[in-house]
Image (tube, rainbow, N blue to C red):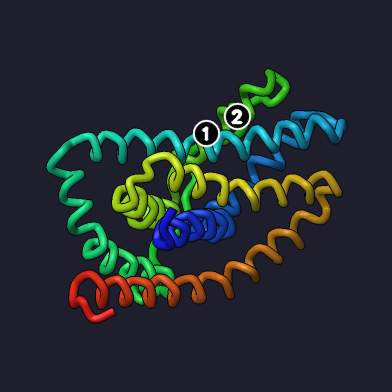
Amino acid sequence: MNAELWAAMGTALWTGIITSVSPCPLATNISALTHISRQSGSHKLAVLAHSGLYALGRALAYAAVGFLLVKSLLSAPAFSFFMQKYGGQLLSPVLVLAGMYMLDMFGEGFGGFNFLDISKFKSKAGAASSLLMGFVFALAFCPISAALYFGVILPLAASNSAPLALPLLYGLGTALPVAGIALALDLGLKKISSVAGAAGRFERYARPVTGWVFVAAGIYLGLKYIFGIV
């Protein structure tokens, strides 16, 4: 396994974490997990089990969509040859633009949205409901998650011929903060505001750092694959 693939795997996992603590996905996750905790009753193991299934549903959604899209593209000989030859050149501007987006160089962007009615999901109906909720909510892309998933993760997966591994790692990255929120809910709903505040502070510092790393990585790939300097 080459260094670039390792770097891509780390990027996918970290990008998932950053996505999940961004305002729109974070608000959706807190709402969903609060609903799960209320529907599951007072039994702590039930709350944690349903929360874990919700996180798993999110990871599976990103993995399934990424695998289907990237695998279908790579199965086309012309596209596969193009990515093998020009993947590095393509990723250079993609990473630079993604980094600029995370640094808000294109403006504040769009606000969050959530058009799904959480009350339609009943955790008492069984484990499948929490798994389905996570799967569906992951597909209700917020602007930040759509930009990073389709703009960074899928091109990375295509250029590294990793249609399952990178989307799955991204999905697991989005699930890790969800697991943390679930543990906070298990400690008591009154503490959820402080958890959300901590996640917001983490995102406020981690997002610009990640943005500059993306820009630097894009410049490096450009120097290496486009200009042949590195």
Q: Which residue is mark 1?
A: 135
The residue sitting at the front extreme is 1
Q: Quadrant of residue 94?
A: bottom left
Q: Residues within 10 Å of mark 2 (few under 14, many from 20)?
A: many
**Image point (33%, 76%), residue name:** 220
Spot occupied by residue 224 in the image (x, y as percentages of width and height):
26, 74
Spot occupied by residue 178 in the image (x, y as percentages of width and height):
65, 48
Q: Residues within 10 Å of mark 1 (few under 14, many from 20)?
A: many
Q: Quadrant of residue 216?
A: bottom left
**Image point (60%, 29%), residue name:** 131
What's under tag 2, amino acid-wise?
A: Leu
Q: Quadrant of residue 227?
A: bottom left
The residue sitting at the left extreme is 78
Q: Which residue is mark 2?
A: 131
**Disc 2 vs disc 1: Cβ atoms closer than 8 Å?**
yes
Left or right of 72, for residue 132: right
Q: Looking at the image, is 8 positioned above or below residue 59?
A: below
Spot occupied by residue 3 in the image (x, y as percentages of width and height):
43, 62
The residue sitting at the bottom extreme is 229
Helix, strand or loop at label 2? It is helix
